[in-house]
Image (tube, rainbow, N blue to C red):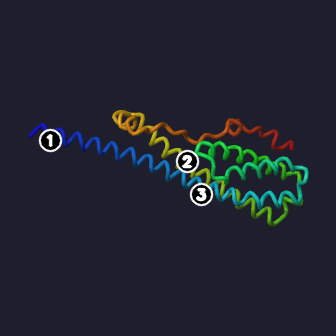
Amino acid sequence: MAAIIVVVVLVLIVILIYNGLIRRRNEVDNAYGGMDVQLKKRYDLIPNLVSTVKQYASHEKELLEKITELRARAVSGSLNNDEKVDLDNQISGTLKGIMVAVENYPDLKANENFLNLQRTLNEVESQISAARRAYNAAVTDYNNGIQTFPGNMMAGMMGMERKEVFLIPEIERQNVNVKDLFNG
């Protein structure tokens, strides 16, 4: 009788560990899906932004071509999650470059269509930041689940591997030189 109880308890422990790992993996997929939706919104805004800026900022042709090429790669559907995250970092940097370049075009800064696009893009960027935080929390929970005992034993049998959190590019981590902001 005691042997049956021990076996039942062990089976229940294995089931709980297994279900916990599956739940964590699904939470990561769900969080990534939420971030992917926000990135899609951004990708949909880019052609309108490029078109509006192109009318005013002919000197920024290289920057506009780069953002267009990055967007095309992003919506191609041929990227895995890690490649999408890397591409998103490149798009973020290029969009910042466009917004800095816009400062040289007073007519563009006053254009109602551009201002509306800029507001919408700012909202989407805020939503992307929130989605990244949710994704990173889910990935951290997942990684903890597959790397701590006894989950690591079950995760090894299931072929579960560590996932990368969404990191901020190194250039965005640097301190802002406020003096440069006022000398532009």
- Residue 114 in picture, x, y percent from top left: 80, 62
- Residue 149 in picture, x, y percent from top left: 35, 33
Q: Which mark is residue 37?
A: 3
Closer to the eye: label 3 or 2: 3
Closer to the eye: label 2 or 1: 1
- Residue 158 in picture, x, y percent from top left: 39, 39
Residue at numbered disc 2: 133
Residue at numbered disc 1: 5
- Residue 56 in picture, x, y percent from top left: 89, 58
| Residue at image coords 19%, 43% | 8
> Which quadrant, please, contains the N terminus?
top left
For the residues labelled 3 and 2, the Cα–Cα distance comes to: 14 Å
Please state if 100 lies on the left or on the right of 7 as rendered: right
| Residue at image coords 33%, 42% | 17
Which mark sits nearer the N-terminus, 2 or 1?
1
For the residues labelled 2 and 1, the Cα–Cα distance comes to: 43 Å
Name the kind of residue labelled 3 in the image. Val
Q: Nearer the viewer, residue 179 or 84?
A: 84
Circle 3 residues within 10 Å: few <14, some 14–19, many ≥20: some
| Residue at image coords 67%, 51% | 74
Which mark sits nearer the N-terminus, 3 or 1?
1
Q: Is residue 100 above or below residue 55?
A: above
Circle 1 residues within 10 Å: few <14, some 14–19, many ≥20: few
Name the kind of residue labelled 1 in the image. Ile
Q: Quadrant of residue 144?
A: top left
Are circles 3 and 2 on residues that touch, CB within 8 Å?
Answer: no
